[in-house]
Image: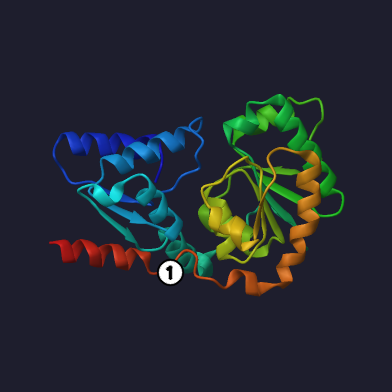
């Protein structure tokens, strides 16, 4: 992954001369203002085996000279896809959700958005507008909720407490569109064949942009609303979601097989 604990574990291990394996290696947003980007780059640099989720990640590492480093780079697919397939049959409806019709699933948490009054105001205005025709459900962290409720323009859509993984899968299975500033949720939208709007200026998952199932809109109110109408039409076009961009759902097995072979 790309958390602070990922980097901490990698640094502790390499300094103790313990081999480091990085799952989800090679991702790049090319935005060094993101803490995750720093963590990814540094973790890759000290890893002995780099398991990549996509071909784009492989290319990123080649461009950074990893072909000449003393390490192995392997495309195994995405372990998140493994998990999504396995747990899709175990999903459950959140107790706080009472809708039986289509809705937009929204998450907002990234500091770029929540710590900018201008960006957050624009996002809330867009979601309020979308909510007039399509109900918006937004599971949200208490800190982000407090920041949203402090705005002059109050949210008119449904803010609910954070949900469990099983509940989030249910929301993904039953929504008509995903609007997010998350990284992983962009992929999960694809796993469940849902179009996605990403409220960021860059994304690590460029394959989704190239496939036409994800739109980068930043925090622009007009773009968020415009693209939400545009991409909803993709729901019926399941052909856009048939490519095995993230492998075949067997990434974990490939990782294990690679490590056993190395022994």
Quarter-of-image position of residue 3? top left
Q: How is the image coloured?
A: rainbow
Would you say residue 102 is visible in this rendering? no
The outermost residue toward the right is 132
Towards the viewer: 119 or 141: 119
Residue 173 location, x and y as percent?
A: 63, 64
The local crowd at label 1, few if under 14, some if 14 to 19, many if 20 or more residues have their Cα within 10 Å, is many
Quarter-of-image position of residue 45? top left
Residue at image coords 44%, 62%: 83
Specify whether 136 is left or right of 199: right
Towards the viewer: 245 or 6: 245
Quadrant location of the C terminus in the rendered image: bottom left
Q: Which residue is mark 1?
A: 249
Specify whether 122 is left or right of 116: right
Specify whether 90 is left or right of 220: left
Would you say residue 176 is visible in this rendering? yes
The number of discs equals 1
Residue at image coords 73%, 54%: 104
Towards the viewer: 174 or 197: 197
Disc 1 element:
loop
Residue at image coords 76%, 61%: 232
Quarter-of-image position of residue 182? top right
Residue 94 location, x and y as percent?
A: 63, 55
Residue 159 location, x and y as percent?
A: 71, 42
Specify whether 108 is left or right of 187: right
Residue 30 location, x and y as percent?
A: 49, 39
């Amino acid at each position: 992954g790309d958390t602070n604990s990922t980097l901490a574990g990698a640094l502790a291990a390499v300094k103790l001369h313990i081999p480091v394996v990085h799952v989800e290696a090679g991702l790049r947003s090319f935005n060094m203002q993101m803490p995750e980007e720093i963590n990814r780059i540094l973790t890759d640099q000290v890893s002995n085996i780099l398991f990549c989720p996509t071909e784009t990640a492989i290319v990123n590492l080649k461009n950074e000279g990893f072909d000449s480093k003393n390490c192995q780079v392997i495309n195994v697919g995405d372990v998140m896809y493994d998990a999504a397939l396995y747990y899709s049959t175990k999903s459950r409806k959140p107790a706080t959700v009472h809708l039986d019709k289509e809705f937009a699933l929204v998450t907002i948490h990234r500091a770029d958005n929540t710590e900018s009054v201008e960006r957050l105001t624009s996002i809330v205005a867009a979601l309020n507008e979308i909510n007039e025709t399509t109900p918006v459900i937004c599971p949200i962290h208490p800190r982000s909720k407090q920041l949203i409720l402090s705005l002059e323009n109050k949210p008119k859509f449904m803010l609910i407490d954070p949900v469990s993984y099983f509940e989030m899968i249910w929301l993904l299975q039953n929504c008509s569109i995903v609007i997010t500033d998350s990284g992983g949720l962009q992929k999960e939208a694809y796993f469940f064949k849902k179009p996605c709007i990403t409220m960021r200026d860059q994304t690590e998952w460029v394959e989704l942009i190239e496939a036409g199932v994800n739109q980068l809109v930043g925090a622009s109110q007009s773009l968020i609303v415009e693209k939400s109408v545009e991409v909803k039409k993709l729901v019926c076009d399941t052909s856009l979601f048939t490519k095995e961009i993230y492998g075949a759902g067997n990434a974990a097995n490939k990782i294990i097989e690679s490590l056993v072979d190395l022994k």
